Image (cartoon, rainbow, N blue to C red):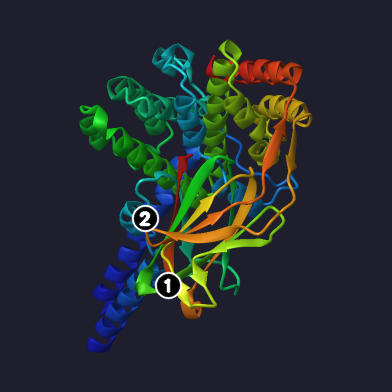
Amino acid sequence: MRKIYSFIIILILTLITSNLYSQCDTFEFLDDCTGQIKPFTFIKSFDVNFATKKGSSKKMEFSYPLNSGHTYIFATCGGNEAKMILNLFDRNHKLIATNYIASSKKYYETLVYECNSTSEYFFEVSFENDQKTCGVVVLGFKAR
Amino acid sequence: MKKILYCFILTLTFVWGCSSGNQKNESDIFDSIANSSKSSNVTKEDVEKILKSFPSPLEINSLIKESGSQYNDEMLNKVENVSNYNRSFNKALNLGIYVTDMGYINIYEKTYTSLKYLDAVKILSNDLKVGQFFDFNSIKRLASNRKNADSILYISTRGFEKMNSYLSDKNRSNVSSLILVGGWIEGLYISTQIVKSKYKKELVDKIGEQKIPLENIYKLLSAYNNEPNFKELVKDFSDLKSLYDGVTISYSQSKEPQMKEVDGRPVFVDNTKSTINISNDLLNKIIEKTSNIRNKIIK
């Protein structure tokens, strides 16, 4: 009978922990991350959750229309204190900005982009050392 | 031992029963809204991508204030109209409209007026069973002080995102689509009405720039084209898109952005310039078409 008890307890614990991991609540990061964008106005957040992402890619891609005359800020907040790397691409998918400067190995939690050309922009997000954790990207703006 | 097994099976059955029971109720509520895009060329992944990239009406609302336009709530959808919306299809579209109206009101720091709109948002979101994502009590408390407009904007935008995320998880992206489309058309309507009364170059440019999100919005709506409720809306947006085909956006030669560090943040300056070309005749047609679509929705 003890074996059955142990089996049930282990089963329940496994179900609970796996459920918690897959549901990694990215909204938990949102309030703190939004604090990083001041004095910009919060526009939108993008969930980055590799636990629920389909496929084997270690990058998540998003797009958003940015407007000329506005300055944007991207703030990255991740779980497990993992550094979240964000690369911004223009409408032709050409890399135009990043929060990780490879030459100096300098990492920033935010990235500011002064936009002068309205179009759809793309950005991809990954974690340092290809960690499969979760986080959030917060986008803010201000007019110039 | 049998008792333990019975207990275990009963627990699992109860948990499963609760979750599937909730889904059943939601299905009932959204029966009148199209539920699939099986016959469309747009995949579920496409729909989710477009929803994630949907522009916030906050930016255009903010620009309206910066352009020096006076606050005018006569343009907004009347709160009293909320009782006219009996179908889930209209409720979802008008929820988007009221959320954009609330954003406009809060940008002008008319927090007291925003409470009336909050009631409309509450009614429609509760009817659509997504009211739990809006922290109505906090918003009401914050609305007592006009200095809290930023906090209200943040809380309501966050609630809106949580709601969209939930609807997407529950395979109810069609509801999200309608809410976002309603919000977008209201933002366009407000800016076109301002330009109609007084020409403002920066606002006209923003109206022209809506050509970019409109491409995706039309693609999104066309996913539901075979549903009777959506047919007329898709046709209207197809007409609007045809007008926008006449708007041109040209770009100066692309140059590498420059980077500088300001207050510990990397700042990249875009060295490419975009120019919007939109004739007055075309602008008037866009103003008229936008007004027709929006007024049809709020009827």
Residue B14 in picture, x, y percent from top left: 33, 58
Give the class, few, some or many, for how many residues have Cα within 10 Å of label 1's Cα (few <14, many ≥20): many
Residue that numbered label 2 is attached to: A27
Seen from the viewer's position, the closer of residues A81 and B230 is A81
Give the x, y percent position of residue B36: 64, 44
Q: Chain of mark 1?
A: A
The answer to whether any part of residue B198 appears in the image is yes
Residue B202 sits above or below residue B46 on the image: above
Nearest the viewer among B39 and B53 is B53
Residue B174 appears left or right of B127: right
Q: Chain of mark 2?
A: A
Q: Residue at x 73, y 26 (%)?
A: B278
The residue drawn where x is 38% and y is 29% is B107
Residue beneath disc 1: A83
Q: Is residue A88 above or below residue B196?
A: below
Residue B27, image x, y percentages: 50, 41
Residue B286 disc label? none
